[in-house]
Image (spheres, rainbow, N blue to C red):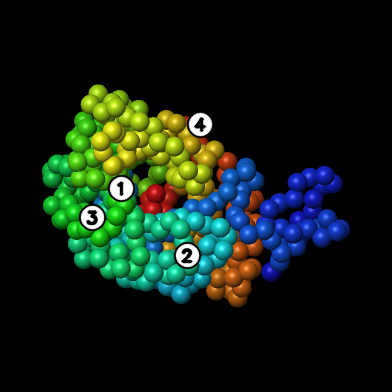
Amino acid sequence: MGYVCCTRRGAALEPGIAHNKAGTADLAQSAPDLHDRFGRRISYLRVSLTEHCNLRCQYCSPEDGTPLFARKDHLAPDELDRLLGVFHALGVRHMRFTGGEPLLYPWLVDRVARARDLGVEKLSVSTNGYLLDRLAQPLAQAGLRRINMSLDSLSAERFSRITRGGDLRRVLRGLFLARDCIPHIKLNVVLLKDENLDEVPELVGFALREGFDIQFIETMPLGIAGSVSRAQSYASVAEAEERIRRSHALEARPRAADDGPARRFGVAGYAGEIGFISPISQNFCAGCNRVRLTSTGRLVYCLGQEDGVDLLGPLRGGFTDEALADFIRHKVWHEKPERHTFNDEPGRAAPVYMMRLGG
């Protein structure tokens, strides 16, 4: 497998492609790290292990639940392990296992152990918490140190409405059991104007008292991803931040080069941090350092656009790990978009299921 790319005299050569003296490109020799053509180093991979979920949250799932996807089209555990190794060799330092609900994936604990064995520096799992009471300890023993858990309300009634039937007591039980064995836990709150915006101070107070980080996330227009109307439900992180500042003095925290998009703040006297993720009101695409891998082996470059490439075909078609790495470098360099278009084209929505991409 190979590509040949012509270059203009004096033009910059693409990373990931070694050029011979005649000026053509040979993808068999390549630089180690993953970059796009906008100068961004891609160091963060989000891996959706399954599109199935035991909740049907309004902003993530259609009301009738997850459609069925053919099993043969999914990555087998050994195929996923190969891809994890390839992405680690490409310089990925942070891997997050998502879903759907990743705790439904039967081989999650083994994949955590595999990523740890590879030497992944930052490994995390995003979960709704429903199965943490069973799996927190095995995950910790496999090497997991970070969890992001959805918690959109502390009201049992609201929580059930947002998740379409979720049991808040069970989620909180799993959360507190996880705290005993997993040191870094962050609560994710999707802002919904008519459901939980007024609850922001209470959620912050709970997180600070219990020693959790917390971050507030704006809803995004993602077509069939969910059934919430953004026009009716959207609340900006500025609205949440203003409510928090009425009772807490926020101290800005510096961002590391490979951090996610959240603006982070601390509060004197508390260990936990408060974060704000603002894909709509404060575009953060210039610092995007991530790509997403679906359970069907599709590499997705941007949550808000359809662009992506199938890796399952090359994986099953005989590509070596080196060829897979070169293929991924080439595709990310050429095809990862500069930014999403939520603000420029508000009527446009990527026709995706959020539970296939994991957010």
Q: Give the percent coordinates (x, y) of residue 307.
A: 54, 50
Please, what is the three-letter code of the amino acid marked with disc 2? Gly
Closer to us: 266 or 61: 266
Establish if 71 lies above or below 162.
below
Is the residue under label 4 in contact with that under label 1 (CB below 8 Å)? no
Residue carrying label 3: 179
Q: Residue furthest right?
A: 22
Residue carrying label 4: 344
Q: Give the percent coordinates (x, y) of residue 201.
A: 22, 32
The residue shown at (25%, 65%) is 137
Please, what is the three-letter code of the amino acid marked with disc 4? Asp
Q: Which mark is residue 119?
A: 2
Q: Give the percent coordinates (x, y) of residue 19.
A: 78, 58
Is the residue under label 2 in contact with that under label 4 (CB below 8 Å)? no
Please, what is the three-letter code of the amino acid marked with disc 1? Lys
Circle 3 Cα neighbour tier, 10 Å, few/some/many (<14 / 14–19 / ≥20): some
Q: What distance separates the C-alpha of mark 4 from that of mark 3?
A: 41 Å
- Determine whether, in the image, residue 258 is placed left or right of residue 129: right
The residue shown at (61%, 48%) is 36
Q: Nearer the viewer, mark 4 or mark 3?
A: 3
Please, what is the three-letter code of the amino acid marked with disc 3? Arg
Is the residue under label 1 in contact with that under label 3 (CB below 8 Å)? no
Q: Quadrant of the N terminus?
A: bottom right
Q: Give the percent coordinates (x, y) of residue 340.
A: 51, 40
The residue shown at (35%, 38%) is 275
Residue carrying label 1: 186
Quarter of the view holding residue 89: bottom right
Q: Nearer the viewer, mark 3 or mark 1?
A: 3
Disc 2 element:
loop
Give whichever of discs 4 and 2 has the lower sequence position.
2
